[in-house]
Amino acid sequence: MFPTLKVVQYYTPQKKVFGVNAVDNIGVYLKEMGLSGKAIIITDPGIAAAGLPERLIKALEKEGFKAAVYDQGKPEPDDISCDQAAEFARKEKGDFVIGFGGGSSIDIAKVVAQLLVLPGVTDDYLINTTFPKKGAPIIAVPTTSGTGTECTMYSVITFAKDGIKGFFGTPTILPDMALVDPTLTISMPPGVTASTGIDALSHAIETMMARQENPFTDAVAIKAIELIAEALPVAVYEGDNLEARVKMSYGSMMAGIAFQDPGIVEGHALAHTLGSVYHVPHGVGCAIALPYAMEYNMGHCMEKLARIAVAMGQNTAGMSVRQAAQTAVFAVKQLIEDVKLPITWAKYGKKEDIPKLTDMMVESPWITAFYGWSKRKMTREAALELLTRSYEGRLGEALY
């Protein structure tokens, strides 16, 4: 049962534009918001090499906007990456910032928009996960279907000094506009399509397992699960299938909106642990963690997992609630395998590292923050079990 007496605050972009070829009219949408002047476009070398920024710049110039492109964004960005982009933006004297690319580029852009207005460097603010006030306007234009960061007030940034994944979580970095154009995702290679898609699926499923879930977030999350389960294999193996790309773009955006209030739970805790220690790409870490996190929550989220099974396309007629919930776990595992992502972290690390990883999962504040949204209490024993099972690839055994 959801917390009926909780006051809920929803933060989503003031303007959300979704549609095929919508990026070609971005200048019109910006004018409708009252924006003018120079855009700082934050992207990465891969997006730049694919020529995608030219399309964006053309659309901006058509409406009289100027633009400067920073194309050195890095995957899994750290505070130094953000500072380098902010220095560029300051020198170019930008008026607003456009994050154009995957989740990493948009996460960098969220920080750059603040540092255009505020003094100092990223590390001055990251330790507190927030900024003291709203910075320059932020526009998010994703070229992947995964993080949903175009609609969230979160930005995942690694501390360069120790490699630990931190994050900003504050309305000050919420994009002022999210423009989602599925045509921008067509050039994504299969591996990136798969990993980002499972990241989006993780957001939706973990939202439904979170302690503060509610009817609104459940409704958005379950539809996201349905869309992703149907469209992800097609998008991976038939990248130019526009219908699949549209469904994935909707699923990713909806999953991002869904987790804004309830948060995400143990799956992301495990993924961030693996990412911090072994630099496992975030979507891959989510793929490894998700089915084990679902099984871990079996006793606390059984009915929700049974609903997820149906959304995953499983026929649960005649099954008990527990059987249906277990079906959901294995349906997710099968989907991950179908898109050729791993379900164990054995190839990334060593089994003898498990005690060290266990310590991180129960002691690092950047990991334990996820448990504030969890229904089940995380213990050292449970963390050890999760890490061991996800290393060995063991599913289907009770965790009690």
Image (cartoon, rainbow, N blue to C red):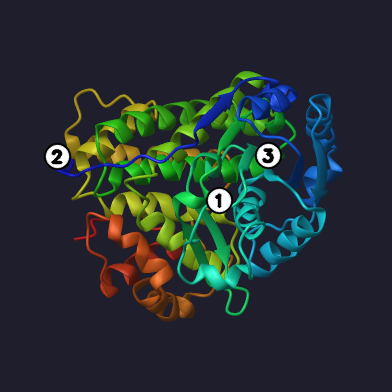
Q: Is mark 3 on a helix, strand or loop?
A: helix
Residue 67 visible at all: yes
Residue picked out by circle 3: 190
Residue at the image point whose x is 82% and y is 34% from the top: 57
**Mark number, residue 81:** none
Residue picked out by circle 2: 4
Is label 2 or label 3 in front? 2
Residue at the image point whose x is 75% and y is 55% from the top: 89
The reply to whether dot 3 and dot 1 touch (C-beta < 8 Å) is: no
Residue 277 visible at all: no
Is label 3 or label 1 in front? 1
Q: Is mark 1 on a helix, strand or loop?
A: helix
Front residue (pair 75, 326): 75
Residue at the image point whose x is 57% and y is 62% from the top: 157
Name which residue type carries label 2: Thr
Residue at the image point whose x is 72% and y is 22% from the top: 25
Distance of mark 3 from mark 1, alpha carbons?
Answer: 13 Å
Name which residue type carries label 1: Gly
In the picture, measured across the screen, residue 23 lies left or right of residue 1, that is: right
x, y percent for residue 359:
38, 79
x, y percent for residue 352:
47, 80
Residue picked out by circle 1: 283
Front residue (pair 43, 163): 43
Q: How crowded is mark 3: few (under 14 residues within 10 Å), some or many (20 or more)?
A: some
In the picture, measured across the screen, residue 233 lies left or right of residue 322, that is: right
In the picture, the quarter occupied by the N terminus is top left
